[in-house]
Amino acid sequence: MDDGARWALGLSGGADSTALLHKLLEHGVRPIALHLNHGFADENGDEAEAFCRELCAGLGVSIRVGRAPGDARPAGGSKEARARGWRMAFFAAEMRAVGTTGLFLAHQADDRAENLVLRLARGCGAEGLTSFGVAGRLPGASDLRVWRPLLDETHAAQVAWLRARGLPWVEDVSNADLTIPRNAIRRVLVPLLPHFVSGANVSADLLAEESACLARLAEAAVLSRSRDVLRLRPGVDPVLARRAIRAWLAPIALTRRQVEALLALPEGTRTQVGGATLVRRLAAAAWRRE
């Protein structure tokens, strides 16, 4: 972390982000708090917003508050996914408005373990299972940095830390909703498997290392690459070929079926991926985007 940078903090009012704010202040870091009220009718967003405003006023911390566009669920998506998209867009806009490029987020070990299970349920391989780390980039805004200093700690540790100091926080009422997959993992799976969080975090670290290794091998399998043409070394392993193709066509989120279709294309034929993108097979290990 660059100590000379001006930092922002994603503040929800929950135990994790509230504890992180207090801990940062104890270490002489005074971030700008960013709070987004999702405006969902089945959540206590107004209570959380009021708490964050009062908390920051009492601590002498600057806060910028926004409100999400609405309560409707997107077609084919979840309320949680839409809320996350709103937050990322809000954070990016506010950070640029105040001229900072660094954001503290209060993700902790439980979040990382839950993320691994959710991705596993979607059928991801090592690349897709690679979870977030301590340092990274804000999704959708590669010029903005993210720092997660609580990843080696648990949610229970944040709650205990706040209670020991008599510090309040707001409990999101939606946390009790077991129809939300993360809540089901937290309230049903974790009590059955006491070592789940620590084990899942070890797995996440190993997967990140192995995925990075495969990425290097896939890059070495590329003979040439431009925006329009990809050529791989003859006889390249299909695992590495799939990775090279996904990297070439990024940011299109190719499914496994689409990648396999590209590998199986007869020479001279083409198929459509990612909406309007057409890809033609040129030779045994070469493709062109049209």
Image (cartoon, rainbow, N blue to C red):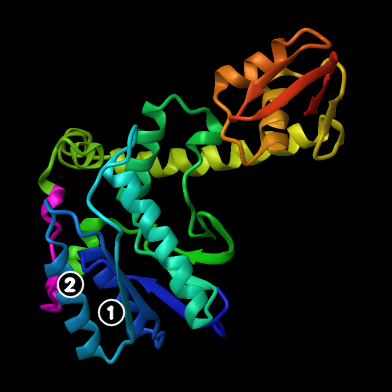
Crowdedness near tag 2: few (<14), some (14–19) or many (≥20) residues, C-alpha within 10 Å: some
Task: Residue 236: tell me if it is visible.
Answer: no
**Rendering quarter of residue 50:** bottom left
Disc 2 secondary structure class: helix
Q: Residue at x 15, y 41 (%)?
A: 187
**Rendering quarter of residue 4:** bottom right
- Which of the labelled discs sits on residue 193, or is there none? none
Work out which residue is located at the far front of the displayed protein and give it: 276
Residue 142 % position (x, y): 59, 59
Q: Which residue is mark 1?
A: 22
Q: Which of the pair 71/159 is nearer the observer?
A: 71
Image-based side of 285 in relation to 48, left or right? right
Q: Residue at x 14, y 77 (%)?
A: 167
Residue 280 % position (x, y): 78, 20
Residue 108 % position (x, y): 34, 56
In the rendered structure, which segment of residues is drawn in magenta? 163-175
Q: Which residue is mark 2?
A: 162
Q: Residue at x 35, y 34 (%)?
A: 117
Callouts 1 and 2 close, C-beta under 8 Å: yes
Callout 2 amino acid: Leu
Magenta-colored stretch includes residue 28: no
Q: CA distance from mark 1 to mark 2?
A: 9 Å
Q: Which of the pair 74/23 is nearer the observer?
A: 74
Image-based side of 171 in relation to 201, left or right? left
